[in-house]
Image (cartoon, rainbow, N blue to C red):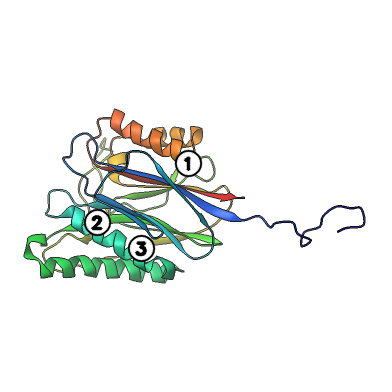
Amino acid sequence: MKGDGTLAAGDGEAEPMPYAAVSALSHAGLVREHNEDSMVIGPWTLCATETRNPQMLVFPLGPPLVVAVADGIGGQPAGEVASALVVRRLAELGPSLDGEEAVREALELCNRAVYDAAEREPELAGMGTTVAGAVVLPEAVLTFNVGDSRVFDASDGELRQVSVDDSPPLPPGRRTTSLITQALGGARGFHAVTPHVRTYPLAVGGRYLICTDGLTDPVPEDVLDGLLREHDDGRAAFELWKAAIDAGGPDNITLAVVRIGEA
């Protein structure tokens, strides 16, 4: 206690506790017969199924927290098997993802695991998936992707893509493409991957959007930006999903909104 009667830090006053709030959902959309997307949030996975409402999970900052989506490649067999395999492997590896090199190694292990599974079961040959996500550490955020699923930083009030699309150059006037230049798996013989991994400082108030192209193909980036300016947490996740549905819901929609807070 100070001489003036006020309580000093260290005299029982609780230190602020930073946390990560993750609001997420996954939906088949309006055209696809089933959902081939999967997601991981820490130890929690959702594999090739749907959430009826946005799910919100809160984690105190400390051990690495991995949040990622995986989009099984359409037009090839067992995309849902590949996406589920990858998010489950990331859930297992999540606590060890403490730096860029660890993330790269984990994605390379995921790639090998997809090919190994296809080799064991010939009906899975050629299966593959994209992946995109973030690892939240006490002082940094590591973003990563392979394929065209995306990670956006919405921390400063302006949406900014921080993932790198593995897609061929778009012709003039075209905004989207279904072609990708690398994925986890996706070929008959083994192909190594070059993951995109970046590190950003962590700050309270930071916000990130992680999503499959079922959101970004039908919904322009300026619309995503506007929705994230207006809404947060579960409401933001719902409104983003609704925008994709209102645009025809042509593909599976999986997304997570990550917010760094302090209690």
Q: Nearer the viewer, mark 3 or mark 2?
A: 3
Q: Which three-letter amino acid code belongs to the residue tagged 3?
A: Ala
Return the mark for residue 233.
1
Disc 3 target residue: 91
Q: Is residue 232 left or right of residue 191?
A: right
Q: Which three-letter amino acid code belongs to the residue tagged 2?
A: Ser
Q: Are marks 3 and 2 in contact (CB under 8 Å)?
A: no
Count all numbered tags in the image, as a single digit: 3
Q: Is residue 81 above or below residue 93?
A: above
Return the mark for residue 83.
2
Q: Is residue 20 left or right of residue 167?
A: right
Residue 165: x and y, percent? 31, 51
For the residues labelled 3 and 2, the Cα–Cα distance comes to: 12 Å
First along the sequence among labels 3 and 2: 2
Residue 41 appears in the rendering: yes
Residue 209: x and y, percent? 42, 46
Q: Residue at x 30, y 65 (%)?
A: 89
For the residues labelled 2 and 1, the Cα–Cα distance comes to: 25 Å
Q: Is residue 208 above or below residue 96?
A: above
Residue 182 appears in the rendering: no
Q: In terms of depth relative to the viewer, which is nearer, 2 or 147?
A: 2
Residue 35: x and y, percent? 22, 45
Q: Are marks 1 and 3 in contact (CB under 8 Å)?
A: no
Q: Which three-letter amino acid code belongs to the residue tagged 1?
A: Asp
Question: Mark 1 Cα within 10 Å, few/some/many (few <14, many 20+)?
Answer: many
Q: Residue at x 47, y 41 (%)?
A: 233
